[in-house]
Amino acid sequence: MGKDENGMAGLEIAIILIAFVTVAAVFSYAVLSAGIFAADREKETLHSALSGAKSNLELSGSVIAADHPETSSVNEILFSVKNAVAGNPIDMTPCDGAKNATNKCVISLTTHNNYISNVKWTWEAIGSNDGDNLLEIGEQFEVTIDLNDLGYGQMLSENMTSNDYFNIQVKPSIGSTITVQRTLPPAIESLMDLH
C-alpha cells in the first residue's frame, strides 16, 4: 500500500511561506531604516541651508567711487550692505589693517594687476542701529575701503583711473559671498555712482 504524504506537503509549504514572510519583513525593515536615515540627513541639510541663507549679506544701493583731486584717480570705494533675510546677525567687525586682524568678514580687492585678500575697511551705520558690530535685522552699514591705506603694507601697484576694472568680494564668516564688479567711467569725477 502507498504512503499518504499530504500532511508533509502542507508542512513544507507552511515552512516556505514563513521563510518568505520573514525575509520580506527583514527587507522591509532595512528599506524603512534607510528611508528614515535619508529623511534625517535631508532635514539636517535643509536646516544647514536655511541657517546659511539667514546669514546672507546683500548689497543695498549703489557703489560709490571718490577721486583724489590731485591725481584724478580713485581713492575710496563705498557701498552699503544689509542682512538679506530676516535672520542671524552677521559679525561686521572691521579690519584694522594689522597683520593678525581679528575681523570675521573678509573683503578682498582685485584690480587689473593686483589681488589683495584682506584689505583694511571700516563701516558706518546708516539709519537706526544698536551700536555694536553685528549687522542685524533692519540695520544697514556703509562700508568704506580707502585705496591709499589697504592695511599691513599692502597697496595697489597703480592707481585706479578711468576705464579701470575692479572686483570686491565681501566674505562673511557664514553665508554666501557678495561680489561687486564695476568699471570706472572714462572721465573721473569727484564722486561717481557706479551702477
Image: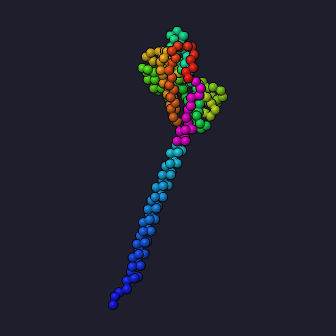
In the image, is residue 36 above or below residue 168? below
In the image, is residue 180 above or below residue 24? above
- Say whether residue 176 is visible: yes
Residue at image position (50%, 28%) is 179
Residue at image position (42%, 66%) is 23
Residue at image position (55%, 18%) is 65
In the image, is residue 33 above or below residue 57? below
- Say whether residue 149 is visible: no
* Nearest the eye: 105 or 191: 191
Q: In the rendered structure, which segment of residues is drawn in magenta? A: 49-62
Q: In which quarter of the image is the N terminus?
A: bottom left
Q: Is residue 175 magenta?
A: no
Residue at image position (35%, 87%) is 3
Left or right, 45 with respect to 11, comes to right
Q: Residue furthest right?
A: 128
Q: Which residue lies furthest to the bottom in this view?
A: 1
Residue 37, image x, y percentages: 48, 53
In the image, is residue 31 above or below residue 102? below
* Nearest the eye: 121 or 51: 51
Residue 157, image x, y percentages: 43, 16
Q: How many labels does the image show?
A: 0
Q: Residue furthest left?
A: 1
Residue 195, image x, y percentages: 56, 23
Q: Which residue lies furthest to the top in this view?
A: 70
